[in-house]
Image (cartoon, rainbow, N blue to C red):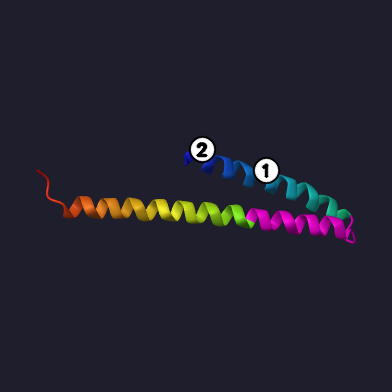
Amino acid sequence: MAENSIDREKVCKDLKIQRAKLFKQFSKHPKDIRLALTIKIIDNQIADCAEWVRTNYTSKEIAKKNIAAVKQKSPEY
């Protein structure tokens, strides 16, 4: 699972770099619809990555809290 998380973060970082380059080109040629559409697609992919990372970390945090709560309630032998 950790490898998958690292892969997702790398993909997200690469997408952000690619988007920045395209946006720089788009700033020079604002009428280029192809660039605008490509940037939009990349934005959607970045949002998907961010959502995956958010839900993945949220579920890990919930699991940690649940484990901590069970440890506090269970008697030690």
State yes or no: residue 34 in magenta.
yes
Q: Residue at x 90, y 61 (%)?
A: 31
Mark closer to the observer (1, 2): 2
Label 1: few (<14), some (14–19) or many (≥20) C-alpha neighbours in 10 Å: few
Name the spot of residue 25 as percent of width and height, x first. Answer: 84, 50
Residue found at x 66% / y 54%: 45
> Furthest residue to the left?
77
Secondary structure mostly seen in the magenta stretch: helix
Residue 14 is marked as 1
**Mark 2 crowd level (few <14, some 14–19, many ≥20, 10 Å Cα):** few
Helix, strand or loop under label 1: helix
User: Relative to residue 76, is residue 52 drawn left or right?
Assistant: right
**Is 67 displayed left or right of 30 in the figure?**
left
The x and y percentages for residue 17 are 71, 45
Give the camera-side residue of 30 and 57.
Answer: 57
Query: From the viewer's perspective, is 49 left or right of 22?
Result: left
Q: Who's the residue at 60% across and 52% down the image? A: 49
The span shown in magenta is 29-46
- Which quadrant of the view contains residue 36? bottom right
Residue 51 numbered tag = none
Residue type at mark 1 is Asp
- What residue occupies the far top of the structure in this picture? 3
- Which percent across, then down, holds residue 60? 40, 51
Mark nearer the N terminus (1 vs 2): 2
Instruction: Indicate the amino acid at tag 2.
Output: Glu
**Distance between mark 1 and mark 2 Cα atoms:** 16 Å
Find disc 2 in the rendering and name its residue. Answer: 3
Q: Which percent across, then down, holds residue 68?
A: 26, 51
42 in magenta:
yes
